[in-house]
Image (spheres, rainbow, N blue to C red):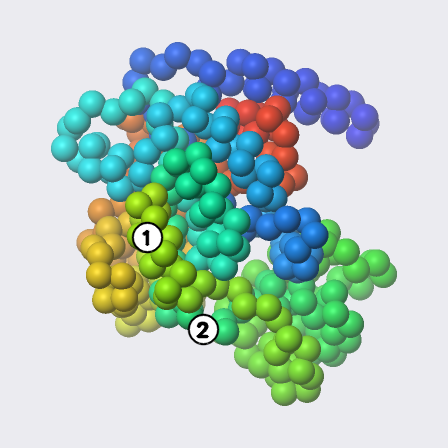
Amino acid sequence: MRFLKNLAKSILTRLAYHYGHHRRQHHEPKLWILMYHRILPTDDPRYHIEEPGMVVTPETFEMHLQEIKRYFTVMRLQDWVDAQESGAQLPLKTCVVTFDDGWMDNFEYALPLLKKHQVPATLFAVAEKIDTSFQFWPNMVMWLLFNAGETFLQQDPLLGKYYPQDKSIIDREFAAEYIRKLKGLSDKDIFTALARIKEQSNLLQAMPRALMNWNELKQMQNSGLVDIGSHTCSHKRLTHHLGTEELQHEIIQSRELLESQLEQKINLFCFPNGDYNRIALDLVAATYKAAVTTQKGIVTYNNFSLHELKRIGLHQQVSGTKRDFGARLSGI
């Protein structure tokens, strides 16, 4: 059965690569928004404490840039939004590159490749965490798992309840499964539990810096290729876990902080984890010109919302070859 499934997937991937949406002629404008998080070589220690669905290698990213220049008109997201609002004629096939969070490796590995290929991008920064020692909790969990800290997770009164008991080998797939289970908890509860572990061990203090500082973010902006958008103040999921005041802080104050530091108008927003409720959506719509989600899809001209723009998530496992990348662009 597994053989047949793999065979069917291989055939679909091949067909999508050769005959998919990215290769077709279109009569109405369509927009492909690519979603990246981290760009890391496999020999970088940070690669191995990242969730599998969050990273591509520099070699893969460069291949992506070459392919999108081949098939699309590549634009800044802000330029596409402005053209759409003004009624200007849009290209029939547009591609936009986006990065979430503000990872240090975007500055180290992505920016040189964007410059080399002259491809514009939009980076959504977690405003209050730039230039700090902040770590995202999934990376903290990964670090503990791969640095002999699994006992602390197992023994924690909250995190231990979700620790998989049926597997003895700790690898990236094991870690990804554990993190998926923990995502049912609130960020506040998870960080509180990890703070308890910090009191018991120095392991987490040894983690490498995750996010850019303000100088690095400004260099991204001053490259002339990268626009900055907001990804909230602290990457909290904008759901029922947050009250109205917290939502306002995350959505509005993040814009004000970025504008103050970067001396540039911030018009674009990205929902953390793709999570939001109606109150958050309305507040974002009142504050920003456009927003992106994690909903998978191609933006079609006659069927989209400027504040719920779909994207295509990319990581090494699903886009490491031209064929896989082409299939991903076609919706597989």
Place residue 46 in its image quadrant. bottom right
In the image, what residue type sits under mark 1? Answer: Gln
Q: Nearer the viewer, residue 314 or 42?
A: 42
> For the residue labelled by badge 2, is the local secondary structure a helix, a strand or a loop?
loop
Above or below 4: residue 297: below
Q: Is residue 269 above or below residue 137?
A: above
- Residue where numbered disc 1 is placed: 221
Q: Earlier in the sequence, mark 2 or mark 1?
A: 2
Mark 2 residue type: Thr
Residue in the picture at 70% in, 52% down? 43
Outermost residue, right direction? 168
Disc assigned to residue 234: none
Asked if residue 309 is positioned above or below residue 175 in the image, the reply reads above
Horizontal side of 230 relative to 190 (left or right) equals: left
Q: CA distance from mark 2 to mark 1?
A: 19 Å
Question: Which quarter of the figure is the C terminus placed in?
Answer: top right
Q: Which residue is mark 2?
A: 132
Write the residue at 45% across / 22% down.
70
Element on which disc 1 rests: helix
- Vertical position of residue 123 compared to residue 207: above or below: above
Query: What x and y, as percent, mark residue 321?
Result: 63, 30
Residue name at image x 31 percent, y 52 percent:
222
Mark 1 closeness class: few <14, some 14–19, many ≥20 residues within 10 Å: some
Q: Residue at x 59, y 37 (%)?
A: 60
